[in-house]
Image (spheres, helix red, strand yellow):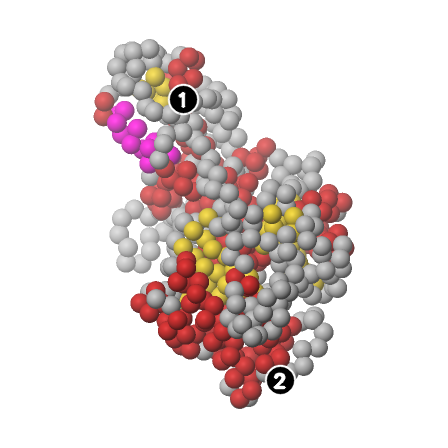
């Protein structure tokens, strides 16, 4: 991985620390020149050691080597953790080294301060995703000294984002020095998450760690104008903010359609009355302003983010649920109507050139099957969704409101006693397995997670589904592709919250600047 500040200069020469030397770092840090000795961050915690005022004091070769190694490890971790899920962007760190006139490379107090602040985002994401439950784990994950990790944790606590226990305890049977436990602050700020589906919406307040603080559903007819339902869901979320008194840092929206970037338009809302290309993100942001929902700054409305609901389900499960630790994660799920898919590759959502990647709902599993909204026949979208299950079981679907709920209830209560329900479930399992086998052959994922009705079908007859996948796919026969149920109850909402939290995860100081 290339260094953010360019190639390291060759050693040699004096060690003067001048303003001209700062240019060799590849540009000043985002906060300008660091304060003098003893400078602290807004939370009052000093990251820097050393005394830059000494000018040409000698720096031992061992010290320089140790510092360069620590910086290289930290920079690699920071760049990996800060890579944006949606677009693969990497936040570049200013190089904490300067070159004097004779080429010697030395760490500066400014550089050390920037190095500590640059670790705030990666550290927060590590705590947010549960990968750093203790200060010792944070130290190891970041590859920094205990002192630096302690200062970073203390600063995040001062910002009201995490808590650090004051009396670390040693777990039973463990040895060594006890470590402070880290956790997200249960009383900290939240984001507003909203999800629109074929028969209504749900709004929620979600904290760090994917914690749902409060939620409220809404059963409405989704009209052709997106502003109608988005005004209602934002109003419901604003009501939750008033009731809880929580500070809001942003808002995210999940919709049953591919969402084009950077326009934020719903490309194919097949199960909604919206027109293709509806500017949902713009309308969502406008509704937030109208409802008085603010972001980090109380003087400015919150920025709205929007994405496909199954993409966000995969993101949430990858960070907080059944997808944790997977490198190449395939997610397939039903909504209230239809079927969607998502792929997480090396920690990043793969959305394709226009946001339409992994439209698995339009994979044909029965050429003579039902006509699909896309113009084809026998797609997963119409052969394995809640409506298809109810019809196969001989049940009257009735109005669209509550199709998923009725299908789940029928499968839960009558699968074991009603042969028609059992046969319908087997039919859908076989068709789902056929579709998944094709995806396994093409994508070679290391884990598959299923949501919505598909999660319930897996739980009803996991062995049948895995057998179909194994019989129809080359890689499935190896038995090395785990098929798991999604763990989160509201993974689409949690994923929408992840969109809103991302700017804070990239730069936690956003909270202080608000």
Q: Residue at x 71, y 47 (%)?
A: 283
Horizontal and vertical percent for residue 324? 42, 56
Q: Residue at x 43, y 27 (%)?
A: 94
Which quadrant holds the N terminus?
A: top left
Classify mark 2: helix, strand or loop. loop
Q: What numbered label is drawn on residue 474?
A: none
Of 261 and 504, which appears nearest the observer?
261
Residue with the mark numbered 1: 25
Which quadrant holds the C terminus?
A: top right
Asked whether, in this view, residue 197 is left or right of residue 1, the answer is: right
How far separated are the C-alphas under marks 2 and 1?
70 Å
Crowdedness near tag 1: few (<14), some (14–19) or many (≥20) residues, C-alpha within 10 Å? many
Crowdedness near tag 2: few (<14), some (14–19) or many (≥20) residues, C-alpha within 10 Å? few
On screen, residue 434 above or below 265: below
Of 279 and 132, which appears nearest the observer?
279
Horizontal and vertical percent for residue 306? 62, 49
Q: Can see residue 239?
A: no
Horizontal and vertical percent for residue 175? 26, 52
Q: Quadrant of residue 491?
A: bottom right
Q: Residue at x 47, y 68 (%)?
A: 435
- Residue 70 in magenta? yes
Q: Of callouts 2 and 1, which one flags the residue occurring earlier in the amino acid sequence?
A: 1
Of 315 and 181, which appears nearest the observer?
315
Determine contact: label 2, label 1, CB under 8 Å: no
Q: Residue at x 33, y 69 (%)?
A: 477
On screen, residue 5 above or below 263: above
- Residue 139 in magenta? no
- The residue stretch that appears in magenta: 63-75
Q: Can see residue 461?
A: yes
Q: What numbered label is drawn on residue 394?
A: 2
Of 181 and 265, which appears nearest the observer?
265
Horizontal and vertical percent for residue 308? 59, 54
């Amino acid at each position: 991985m290339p260094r953010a500040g360019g190639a390291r200069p060759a050693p040699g020469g004096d060690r003067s620390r001048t303003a001209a030397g700062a240019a060799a770092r590849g540009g000043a840090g985002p906060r300008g020149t660091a304060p003098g000795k003893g400078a602290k961050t807004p939370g009052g915690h000093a990251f820097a050691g050393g005394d830059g005022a000494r000018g040409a004091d000698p720096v031992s070769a061992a010290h320089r080597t140790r510092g360069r190694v620590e910086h290289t490890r930290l920079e690699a971790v920071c760049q990996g953790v800060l890579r944006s899920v949606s677009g693969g962007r990497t936040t570049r760190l200013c190089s904490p080294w300067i070159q004097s006139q004779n080429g010697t490379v030395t760490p500066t107090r400014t550089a050390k301060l920037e190095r500590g602040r640059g670790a705030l985002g990666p550290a927060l994401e590590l705590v947010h995703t549960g990968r750093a439950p203790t200060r010792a784990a944070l130290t190891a994950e970041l590859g920094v000294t205990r002192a630096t990790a302690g200062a970073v944790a203390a600063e995040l606590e001062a910002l009201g984002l995490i808590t650090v226990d004051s009396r670390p305890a040693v777990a039973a049977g463990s040895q060594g020095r006890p470590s402070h436990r880290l956790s997200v602050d249960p009383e900290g700020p939240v984001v507003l998450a909203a999800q629109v589906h074929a028969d209504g919406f749900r709004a929620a307040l979600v904290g760090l760690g994917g914690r749902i603080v409060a939620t409220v559903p809404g059963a409405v007819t989704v009209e052709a104008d997106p502003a109608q339902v988005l005004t209602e869901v934002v109003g419901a979320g604003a009501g939750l903010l008033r009731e809880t008194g929580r500070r809001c840092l942003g808002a995210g929206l999940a919709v049953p359609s591919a969402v084009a970037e950077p326009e934020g338009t719903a490309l194919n809302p097949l199960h909604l009355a919206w027109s293709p290309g509806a500017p949902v993100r713009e309308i969502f942001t406008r509704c937030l302003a109208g409802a008085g929902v603010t972001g980090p700054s109380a003087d400015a409305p919150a920025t709205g983010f929007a994405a496909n609901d199954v993409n966000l389900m995969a993101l949430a499960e990858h960070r907080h649920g059944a997808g944790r630790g997977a490198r190449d994660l395939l997610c397939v799920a039903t909504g209230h109507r239809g079927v969607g898919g998502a792929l997480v590759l090396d920690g990043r959502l793969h959305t394709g050139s226009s946001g339409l990647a992994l439209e698995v709902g339009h994979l044909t599993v029965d050429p003579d099957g039902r006509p699909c909204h896309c113009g084809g026949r026998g797609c997963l979208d119409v052969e394995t969704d809640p409506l298809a299950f109810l019809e196969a079981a001989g049940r009257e679907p009735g109005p669209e409101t509550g199709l998923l709920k009725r299908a789940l209830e029928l499968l839960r209560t009558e699968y074991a006693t009603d042969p028609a329900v059992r046969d319908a479930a087997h039919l859908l399992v076989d068709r789902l397995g056929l579709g998944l086998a094709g995806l396994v052959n093409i994508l070679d994922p290391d884990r598959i997670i299923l949501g919505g009705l598909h999660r319930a079908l897996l739980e009803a007859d996991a062995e049948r589904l895995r057998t179909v996948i194994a019989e129809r796919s080359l890689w499935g026969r190896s038995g090395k592709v785990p098929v798991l149920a999604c763990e989160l109850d509201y993974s689409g909402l949690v994923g929408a919250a992840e969109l809103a939290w991302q700017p804070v995860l990239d730069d936690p100081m956003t909270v202080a600047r608000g």
